[in-house]
Each structure stands twice: as C-alpha cells, then as structure tokens.
Image: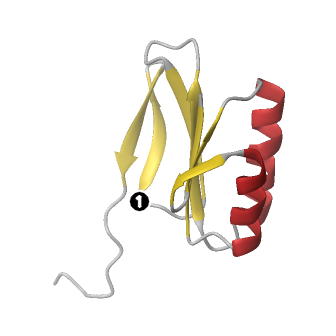
Amino acid sequence: MLVIVVENAPDRLRGRLAVWLLEIRAGVYVGEFSRRTRERIWTLVKEAIGDGNAVIAWSAPTDAGFDFDTVGANRRKPVDFDGFKLVQFRPPATGRSTI
C-alpha cells in the first residue's frame, strides 16, 4: 500500500498524481506499486511540490509495518529513534515576540 498526502500542491502535480493513484480525498492519494514505481512517483513529487509539502507512507518490513518520508516545509519532521522512525514537532512559527 502506498499513500501520498499533499498540501498546497500545484494543480499540475495533483493532476499527475491522479494519473497514477486514486484520490480518495482532496490531496490524499492511494495505490499499490512496486518499489521502483513508488520511488519514481516520489521523485516527481519532490521536483514539483514548489511551496507546498507532502508526505509518503508505504508498507515496509519494519517494526511499525510501514515507512514514510516528507518533503517541503511542515512542523512535522521524521526522526530516527534507535532504528524506529518517529515524528518530531517543530515549534510553531509566530510573528510575535514572547518577551
């Protein structure tokens, strides 16, 4: 299983993803592909995401049963914790001083 979620993605990228994957909700794409095809699709996303952001998750032989990667600006950042991938939250960006 392969899942890609995009936010603020260009229309051209969304249309391209819809050719390969089923869009089950706005910006949420699912499908079942080989590793090679998955990597080609993800390369396309990384090249075309522009100012948006995306996450990909796929079935993998890990303790969690899946793996994931991200691209673009987002508060969530994948981190390796002793061989187990977790999500770390960055502090929210604010324009105000906290003094």
The residue wearing badge 1 is 75
Secondary structure at numbered mark 1? loop
- Give the quadrant of residue 39: top right
* Between 97 and 63, the one nearer to me in the picture: 63
With 91 as the anchor, is 12 left or right in this view?
A: right
Kindly identify the amino acid type of the residue bearing the numbered disc 1. Arg
With 93 as the anchor, is 70 left or right in this view?
A: right
Question: On screen, 39 above or below 59?
Answer: below
Question: Residue at image x 77%, y 71%?
Answer: 12
Residue 52 horizontal/vertical position (percent):
60, 69
Residue 86 horizontal/vertical position (percent):
40, 33
Quadrant that contains the N terminus: top right
Quadrant that contains the C terminus: bottom left
Residue 43 horizontal/vertical position (percent):
79, 48
* Between 99 and 22, the one nearer to me in the picture: 22
* Between 10 and 72, the one nearer to me in the picture: 10
- Give the quadrant of residue 37: top right
Of all residues shown, which one is farthest toward the left? 99
Question: Residue at image x 55%, y 28%?
Answer: 67
Question: Residue at image x 75%, y 35%?
Answer: 38
Residue 75 horizontal/vertical position (percent):
41, 59
With 15 as the anchor, is 4 left or right in this view?
A: left
Label 1 neighbour load within 10 Å: few <14, some 14-19, many 20+ = few
Question: Residue at image x 78%, y 59%?
Answer: 16
